[in-house]
Image: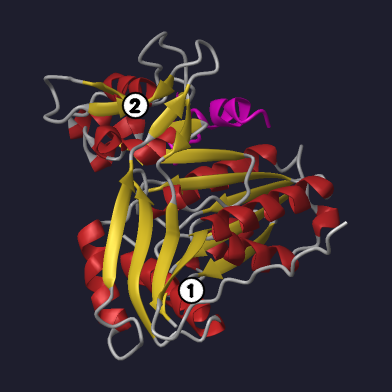
Amino acid sequence: MHEFSVTSQIVRSVLEEAEKRKAKKVTEVHLVIGKLTFLGLEQVRFAYEALTKGTIMEGSRLLIDEQEGVVKCNHCGYEGGFKYEDDPMYHVPVPTLKCPQCGSVVNIVAGKECTIKSIKMMI
Amino acid sequence: MAALKKKEVVKAEEGEIYDVELSEDLLKANQRLAEENRQFLHKNGVRAIDVMGAIGSGKTSLIEKLVQLLKVKHRIAVFKGDLTTTIDAELIARHGVETIAINTGKECHLDANLVKKALQKLNLNNVDLLLIENVGNLICPAEFPLGSDKRVVVVSVTEGPYMVVKHPFIFMEADVVAINKVDLADAMGVDVKQLEKDVKRINPRAIVVATNGRTGEGVGDVAKALEL
């Protein structure tokens, strides 16, 4: 939903970092985007291409790792993926905050990030 | 003892590729500000409630009824988020509580920074309860915590029977869910019990209350669920 504004922030941060190091060109940017964010990767790529045009980032490679949603149960110690419940009434499995192991309520510990992991640049 | 060797400095050569580890989380900036808001509010003895929900779900009506019910007990202020206009803010202000309209312009959600700016306009000595009405939207506000203590999601039966399962992530954020306009459930052919089951399935922690924002039905239970 906020791909354009978030990607502008990404591009701004990368350019600032590149300027600090007096880079001539940025060749690669590596992002981690959580699956629980509302960021569509295709839209991020589209915005990235548009926003880097005419900058030293133009033509750089954009790598995006997707981070799965991870939940943690304080009751039984489970840490891992969400439990999805299938219901014939709906056509898609519905995610739930119930622990897949013991049924207690879990906390989300990963999957909401949007991180610039690393940047490759030519100095 | 041998003299210490000069520290070696690794420098990138001309034209060399330099790999910078950054690990900067861009959504964290908002989360940090939200945490600052939360601490600022607590320091001033203010509890804050964020009310989210789709356009037309009845957030403003619910807040009006909450204000009417609670203004004898609490010193209330309201932040009212909208893209533009102060129409709703004026509706709420009629009840004699300090109301600040936050116009986001084009943004589809409030963020911690806008709330921080609004907080600077408020005399917190006269407030112990802050109700924040988010911009009407079931998607984006979930991603932007504001620094409130509790989050309410309002979903009305007029939005149809599948609203909860179609937007699971905002319901995961909710402490309290108000299923609103229950008087229209029959006319809409929507089963309130099923909506409640859907919420409980996605977020067993959430307290679900059936409400009617026009008559005030269920609003007392919302207040109770919020421990107000």
Residue B15 picture quarter: bottom left
Label tally = 2
Q: Nearer the viewer, residue A83 or B116?
A: A83
- Element marked by disc 2: loop
Q: Which residues are magenta?
A: B209-228
Q: In the picture, which quadrant includes the N terminus of chain A?
A: bottom left
- Compared to residue A55, the image places residue A66 above or below, namely above
How did the renderer colour the structure?
secondary structure
Q: Residue at x 45, y 80 (%)?
A: A15
Q: Is residue A52 magenta?
A: no
**Chain identifier of the residue bearing label 2 in the image:** A
In this orientation, does residue B24 appear?
yes
Q: Residue at x 24, y 80 (%)?
A: A59
Q: Is residue B221 left or right of residue B195?
A: right
- Element marked by disc 1: helix
The disc label shown at residue A13, or none: 1
**Chain identifier of the residue bearing label 1 in the image:** A
Q: In the picture, which quadrant includes the C terminus of chain A?
A: bottom left
Q: Residue at x 15, y 31 (%)?
A: A92
Cα separation between marks 1 and 2: 32 Å
In this orientation, does residue B179 appear?
no
Q: Is residue B61 left or right of residue A37?
A: right
Instruction: Tell me where residue A6 appears, x and y as whole percent.
Output: 40, 66
What's under tag 2, amino acid-wise?
A: Phe
Question: Going from the N terminus, do you reach mark 1 or mark 2 first?
Answer: 1
Reading the image, the residue beneath label 2 is A82
What's under tag 1, amino acid-wise?
A: Ser
